[in-house]
Amino acid sequence: MFWPKRNTSTSSDASDASASSNTSNALIYDTVIHIGKLNDLLKEGWKFTTDNSSEASAQRSMINYEDSLIVGILGSYNRGKSFLLNKLCRTQFPTGRLISTEGISIAGPRDTCKNLVFIDTAGTDTPTKREDLDDKRAIEALLREIVLGLCSYIIIVMNRLQLTDQIYMHEVLEYCSKLSPKGKPEIIFVHNLWDLEFEEDINIVIQREIEDILGAKLTTIQQRNDSKDIELKMYCSTFNQITIRHFIMAKEDSAAADNWNEQTLDSLMTILQADLPSRRSACIFDEVLIHINKRLPQLLSSNNGSDADLSKIQATKHETEPYIVLSELKDASLEKRKQHASSFSVAPRLLYDQRGYLVGIVSSGTEKWQPRYRQYKTTDHLNIIVELAGFNESNFTAEMERNVAVIRGERIEPAGLSAQTIPDQLQFSTGSFELSVFVKEDIDNDQTDFECKDGFLTIKCPLRKYAKKRFGTKSNADNQKTHTVKDKI
C-alpha cells in the first residue's frame, strides 16, 4: 500500500542542502496582516508587519506578485500548516517578530519555490475568552472566505481524522461546490500523521480513514512538467464533482517518512509548478482589503442606527503607519485612534449559513432575519432572485448601489392571531429583515430592473459590455487574410 522510496542523486542532495543552508535564516513570510479582533479595527486598526523592521518598508506589502500561482493553506489549530509550508519552501520557521497565530501571512516566491505565493492562516478552534466568541467566529469565517476567494489551490492540513476535521472539510467543500467553475479552487488534503513512525501504522490509517471513511482510491497520473512526464501517485476522492487529492506525511526522520515525506513534497511542488494557466499577477494585500470591505457592512452595525453609514464603511491602509484602519482614521495617529469613539460596533449577533459562512447580522433590539436568495448569470444579465413570500411593494424596499443590492422589509403577524410554538417544527420568520447581496460582476446600475411577482423579487442587472477598438495599421495576420481572399477572387 505504500510507495517505493524516491531515488535521489548525490547532486540533488547537495543542491537541496545548499538551498537549505542559504535559506535557513530567511524569513518565511513577506507580510503578516494581524487580523485578530473586529473591535481592534474600530480603533487602532490591524497592524501588518513585513520582513523588514523599517516602517518605511511598509510599502513593500503592496508588492505585485507577477505570474504567480496563489496557494492557500487551511486547517484547524496545531495541525502542522506552518510545518508543511516550511518544507515546501525549504526554509525554517522564523523566530523573530513575524511569528503570528492570528490573521493572514503571505510568503512570496523565492529560489526554492519560484512563481508560488503561499497564504497561511491562523488555525481554527483556538481557545478564546467567552466575551470574544462571536468576534472570533466572525474573524475565522472572514479569513476562510478571503483565502477561498483569492487562491487557485487550497491545501487543507489535518492529522488523524477527527469529527471536527470532517466538519471543517465539509464546510470548505460545500462552499467551493457553490462557486462558479472558473472560481473553484483545486483542493488538496495533506494527512500529516506526525506521530506515526512505521509503515504498518500508516497503512492502517490509510485503509480506515482515507479509503473507508473518505472514499479515496490510489491513483497514478502523468504530470507534464518542464517538457517531461512525471508519474505521481496519490489518493483521490470526490465531493459534488470536486476531485480531492490526498497526500500523506509521517513523523519526521522516521522509517515511514523515508517512503512518504519527500515523495509528498515533490508531488505537491510538481503539481503546483506545472499549472501555468492558473498563474496570475496579484497584489495580495489589495485583494485582501477588497474582500474585507465586501464583508464589513455585515460584520458591523451603526451606533446611530443609520444603515446608510454602513454602506460607506471602508478599511484602508493608513497613510503613514503599517496599519489597516477605517477610512475615517487613515491619517490619524495611533494615540488618537486609541481615543477614538467609533460610530460603529461589532454586530451583536452574526448569522451564518449551514456551512459556517457569514450571511448577515441580527441588530441589537430587533429580530432581523434573512430571506433566501440565488444568483443566476446569463450572457447578458445577472439576475438576483429573492424569496419574499407575502411581500409586495408596500412592505419592502430594494435598491442597487454599485455592486451591492440591499433589500429591507418587515413581515407582520396576522392581525388578531397569536402564534403557537411547536417543537421541531420550522416556522416562517416574522419581523424586520435586511439583506445585502454582493455582486462580483461588472454591472450597469442605471439599467437595473426590479420585479416582485408570485412571492419572488427579481433584480435584473445588465452586464457591462466593452467594445474592442483598434488604432494603427493592420497586423501581418490581417494583411495575410486580405491577400488570401484576393487570391481566391
Image (spheres, rainbow, N blue to C red):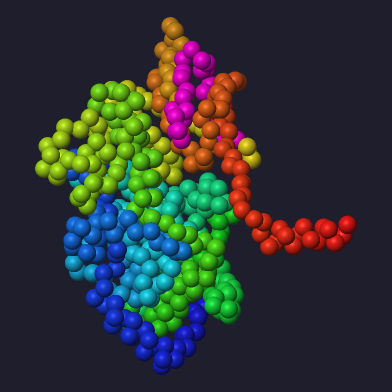
**Residue 460 occupies which quadrant of the picture?**
top right
The residue furthest front is 473
Residue 222 on image: x %, y %: 59, 75
Residue 217 on image: x %, y %: 56, 68
**Residue 421 occupies which quadrant of the picture?**
top left
| Camera-nearest residue between 304 and 121 | 304
Magenta residues span 381-406
| Camera-nearest residue between 125 and 385 | 385
16 up-or-down from 344: above or below: below
Seen at 24% across and 57% down, the residue is 58
**From this viewpoint, is residue 462 visible?**
yes
Seen at 61% across and 46% down, the residue is 468
Residue 410 on image: x %, y %: 42, 18
Residue 338 on image: x %, y %: 13, 40
The residue furthest bottom is 10
390 up-or-down from 141: above or below: above
Seen at 44% across and 82% down, the residue is 259
Q: Specify whether 246 is left or right of 28.
A: right
Magenta span: predominant SS is strand
Residue 359 within the magenta-colored segment of the rendering: no
Q: Specify whether 474 is left or right of 278.
A: right
The residue furthest right is 489
Residue 389 within the magenta-colored segment of the rendering: yes
**From this viewpoint, is residue 374 visible?**
no
243 up-or-down from 369: above or below: below
Seen at 53% across and 67% down, the residue is 275
